[in-house]
Amino acid sequence: MKKSFLTTLCVGIFMMLSVTSCFSTTNMLQYSGMIPSDVTTAEVQQSIKDAAAKRDWILKDLGNNSYEATYIARGHSIKVNISYTRSNYEISYVSSTNMEYNPTEGTIHRNYNRWVNNLKHDIDIGLLQASAR
């Protein structure tokens, strides 16, 4: 009886792990944030640059209040556009490599949202710190 229970338990755990690994993609999220009214354009730019550097993103200034940011990790890469106005900013998908992107279903590898959310979080912190000065 004990051996049968352990066998059933092991099979159940194996099946559960197999099923969860099938869900390697997730819905791709749009990211945007508010810019405090007392933060200057230079401080917005610096917050974006600092956040990108902290998370090892490669940043390219496109002019017109826009940056192209690229993140590379273990054979995967994503490219996003970071654009900003006086009151808000937006991070939008541009392209990716080895990220299982499906434009029809709007899904992408689950790490995409984590990587972009980390970047957004650090931009938000920089903006809040600039506003507090």
Image: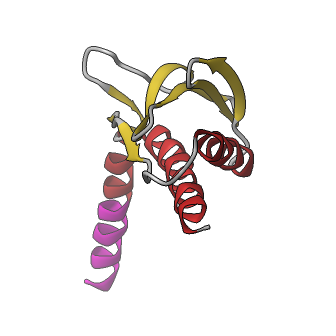
Q: Is residue 7 left or right of residue 130?
A: left
Name the residue rendered at 33%, 28% in the picture: 107
Q: Quadrant of residue 104?
A: top left
Residue closest to the eye, 44 or 56: 44
Q: Residue 70 falls in which quadrant of the image?
A: top right
Image-based side of 63 in relation to 35, left or right: right
Q: Quadrant of residue 48?
A: top right
The quarter in which the N terminus is drawn is bottom left
Q: Which quarter of the figure is the C terminus placed in?
A: bottom right
Left or right relative to 116: residue 130: right
Give coordinates of residue 45: x percent, y percent: 64, 39
Outermost residue to the bottom: 2
Give me the residue at 50% from left, 48% from top.
120
Scheme of colours in the image:
secondary structure
Examine the structure image and report whether residue 130 is included in the region drawn in magenta.
no
Percent position of residue 12, x then y: 29, 62
Q: Residue at the spot x=44%, y=42% of the render? A: 113
Task: Report the residue at 53% width, 51% height from top.
Answer: 39
Q: Is residue 4 one of those drawn in magenta?
A: yes
Judged left or right of residue 49, residue 113 is left
| Placement of 107 over or under 10, stated as above or below | above
Q: Position of residue 5 (x, y in %)?
A: 27, 77
- 123 lies above or below 4: above
Q: How many numbered callouts?
A: 0
Magenta residue span: 1-13
Tell me which secondary structure the magenta stretch mostly adopts. Answer: helix
Residues 95 and 67: in front is: 67
